[in-house]
Image: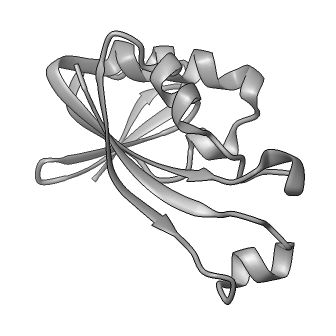
Amino acid sequence: MVTPVSSQHELYQFDELSIYAGDFFTAPISPVDIIYDRAALIAMPQEMRQEYAQRLKSLLAAGGRILLVTLDYPQEEMAGPPFSVPKQEIEALFEGFTVSLLESDEVDAQHPKKAKKGLSRFAEEVWLIES
């Protein structure tokens, strides 16, 4: 079911799942318990990441969690997007929250991303961020 929420946003709902379509920074979203970011943070240049993280934190209900998937590679070896967002930046963006690395998948030399782009190192990482 599609419901217009404002002149610039729509809400798609199915059972307990709600998906908003529109500008993330202005969407009229109430606090939620769980946020999943598969590719938004790594698509943003560094100058937008602080505002994005602030918005995520403002949308997270007390006791809520964020599952965040990022990439870590030498940024100077490949122009983004997707951009590298290293551990230090994630910890700084979510200061005051509990940040835990759940998984780091460091690829081998045969991985297409590493081989094709000539990267010295490339890892996909999964973070749990808790308020």
Residue that protrudes farthest toward the bottom in the picture: 110
Query: Seen in the image, is 36 located left or right of residue 92?
Result: left
Q: Position of residue 36 (x, y in %)?
A: 35, 45
Q: Residue at x 27, y 53 (%)?
A: 1
Q: Nearer the viewer, residue 105 or 64?
A: 105
Query: Seen in the image, is 49 located left or right of residue 67?
Result: right
Does 74 sit above or below residue 111? above
Q: Residue at x 58, y 30 (%)?
A: 23
Does residue 102 appear anywhere in the picture? yes
Query: Seen in the image, is 68 located left or right of residue 84?
Result: left
Q: Quadrant of residue 22?
A: top right
Q: Position of residue 112 (x, y in %)?
A: 71, 84
Q: How many marks?
A: 0
Query: Seen in the image, is 36 located left or right of residue 47?
Result: left
Q: Position of residue 32 (x, y in %)?
A: 22, 27
Q: Nearer the viewer, residue 39 or 120?
A: 120
Here the colouring is one colour
Q: Residue at x 59, y 39 (%)?
A: 86
Does 62 sit above or below residue 22? above
Does residue 30 appear anywhere in the picture? no
Q: Position of residue 75 (x, y in %)?
A: 80, 47
Does 33 sit above or below residue 14? above
**Quadrant location of the C terminus?**
top left
